[in-house]
Amino acid sequence: MSSVTILERAFALARSGEHTSVQSIRARLKGEGFANVEAHLSGHSISRQLRKICLEARAGSPEPTA
């Protein structure tokens, strides 16, 4: 496994524009094998920062075509 921490990965996922919520990021982290995801991302400050980054990243991304 790489040396990327769970918080570093969470913020990278938020910046990717692929996620619309912290719940989506949590699910992805769990799927990637990170442990104790809830404990690391349960704080109000972290959640608020991740939500803000998700919104900003998606605002700068074109809407997906379905």
Image: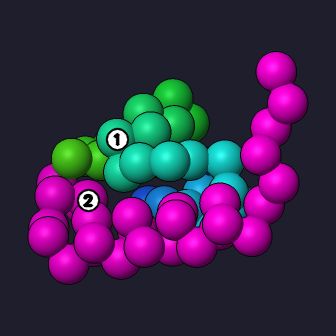
Residue 13 in which image quadrant: bottom right
In contact (CB < 8 Å): disc 2 and disc 1:
no
* Three-letter amino acid code at the position of disc 2: Leu
| Colour scheme in use | rainbow
- The kind of secondary structure the magenta stretch mainly shows is helix
| Residue depicted at x 21% and y 47% | 38
Q: Is residue 44 left or right of residue 56?
A: left
Query: What crowding class fits label 2: few (fewer than 14 Cα within 10 Å), some (14-19), or many (20 or more)?
Result: some
* Membership of 24 in magenta stretch: no
Residue 14 at what x, y percent from top left?
Answer: 55, 62
Above or below residue 2? Residue 20 is above
| Residue depicted at x 82% and y 21% | 66
Residue 56 in which image quadrant: bottom right
Residue picked out by circle 2: 41
Q: Is residue 18 left or right of residue 38?
A: right
Between disc 2 and disc 1, the foreground one is: 1
* Three-letter amino acid code at the position of disc 1: Gln
Residue 20 at what x, y percent from top left?
Answer: 50, 48
Q: CA distance from mark 2 to mark 1?
A: 10 Å
Q: Nearer the viewer, residue 25 or 7?
A: 25
Q: Is residue 50 left or right of residue 66?
A: left
- The segment highlighted magenta reads 39-66
Residue picked out by circle 1: 23
Residue lying farthest to the top in this orientation: 66
| Residue depicted at x 34% and y 41% | 23
Counting residues from the N terminus, which is met first, the one under dot 2 or under dot 1? 1
Residue 43 in which image quadrant: bottom left
Element on which disc 2 rests: loop
Q: Nearer the viewer, residue 25 or 61?
A: 61
